[in-house]
Image: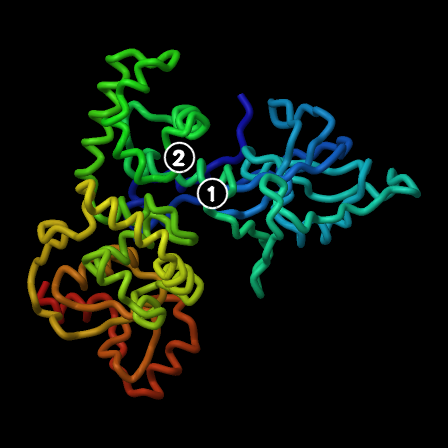
Amino acid sequence: YDIDGIVIKVNDYGQQEELGFTAKSPRWAISYKYKAEQVETLFQSVSYQVGRTGAVTPVANLKPVLLAGTTVKRASLHNANEIERLDLREGDTVYVEKGGEIIPKVMGVNLLKRQPDAQPILYPLLCPVCGTPLVRKDGEAVHYCPNEDGCRPQIVGRMQHFIGRKAMDIEGMGDETIETFYRLGLLHNITDIYTLKDKQEELIQLERFGQKSIDNMIAGIEKSKEKPFEKVLFALGIRYVGETVAKKLALHFKTIDALMAASKEEIQSVYEIGERIAESVTEYFANGLHREQIERLRQHGLQLAVEEKEVEQLGDSLAGKSFVISGVFEQFSREELTALIESHGGKLLSSISGKLDYLVAGDKMGPSKLAKAEKLKIPIISEQELLQLIGS
């Protein structure tokens, strides 16, 4: 069998016990990855995919080649910067490998085999699907199609994301179902999913949709209304808001109304939420169409607030106190420390300022944070001192 690496361990149980664990891994084991296999093949053309957020991703179409046990025909080129870095031209011979032995990527060009008349790749100015002029924000490598309400792959992609297992997890619906319903005009946006129960006469006329499958789908849609607020927030598909960020925002603001009313600065004050995420969230909720959809989701009975039982309080020994966590810790991961502080009434901040009460410092903490905390005379405590504050 092919393998992509090995794990090297200390071969003595006593020494393993003595070495112990960090918060994330054993000290007595380390992984070693082999250098990825690399092959040459012919680059034939570029096609462009539009994702649910409007991001346009260039994909290299390759002459089929066997690589790490599978035939590779396509490889991601990521963005315009990557095409420019590679100096990729039509008809080039390229080096391809699999990132992490899974995803094919173009690593470079064999310039010795380049044809003298090879033409450079010109990145499109218009969306390859809807023809809208592409935009590119300062400091970002990715081009976006801004036509989110009129560009088919964005509309369909958002609905597919919404029903996904990590989001609303609607049983009886899949990507193909969304494609079909959109093509037939049964769905136009995420809120229409909750109106399908009123369209059963139309659904029963469709091929491969019997009464049982329709009943299962409607039951799955109704059950999704029980999903907690953090899942709904993630399901909205806000750019840069993944599962972890959605959970942090939900627990901090407690309701969709509080989050919609929050300023960019207030969102950025949430622990580990940076400027880019805060800007994306405020832009999303500034869009009137998004607010209308949220109101319709509210009318359909979705959970748009954190239930009290979701925020389990173990005590109030840290009530009114604010913390910043920095570095690597022996006993806990940063996520565990965050949960510990919040469950005892404390608040996490994303940066050091005069308003901060404590800096919880671990190994490998950034020197700038330490210097700023010392300058502002903010108490710097270890994880053990934090436990003493809590009373554990």
The residue sitting at the left extreme is 315
Q: Residue at x 80, y 43 (%)?
A: 89
In screen coordinates, is 29 left or right of 303? right
Give the vertical position of 217 relative to 264 (above or below).
above
Q: Are marks 1 and 2 in contact (CB under 8 Å)?
A: yes
Q: Residue at x 66, y 27 (%)?
A: 73
Q: Please state, as top left, top right, bottom left or bottom right, where the C terminus lies in the image.
A: bottom left
Residue 245 image point, x, y percent = 33, 54
Judge the density around disc 1: few (<14), some (14-19), many (≥20) Cα neighbours within 10 Å: many
Q: Residue at x 28, y 37 (%)?
A: 168
Residue 215 image point, x, y percent = 22, 19
Q: Please, which colouring scheme is shown?
A: rainbow
Pick the front one: 272 or 135 = 135
Disc 2 is placed on an element classified as helix
Disc 1 marks a residue whose amino acid type is Arg
Disc 2 marks a residue whose amino acid type is Gln
Instruction: Tell me the distance, in whole angstroms, between the alpha carbons under discs 1 and 2.
Output: 9 Å
Tell me which corner region of the image, top left, top right, bottom left or bottom right, holds residue 117.
Answer: top right
Judge the density around disc 2: few (<14), some (14-19), many (≥20) Cα neighbours within 10 Å: many
Check residue 318 in the rendering and tell me which mark sits there, or answer none. none
In screen coordinates, is 364 left or right of 247? right
The residue tagged 1 is 52
Check residue 160 in the rendering and tell me which mark sits there, or answer none. 2
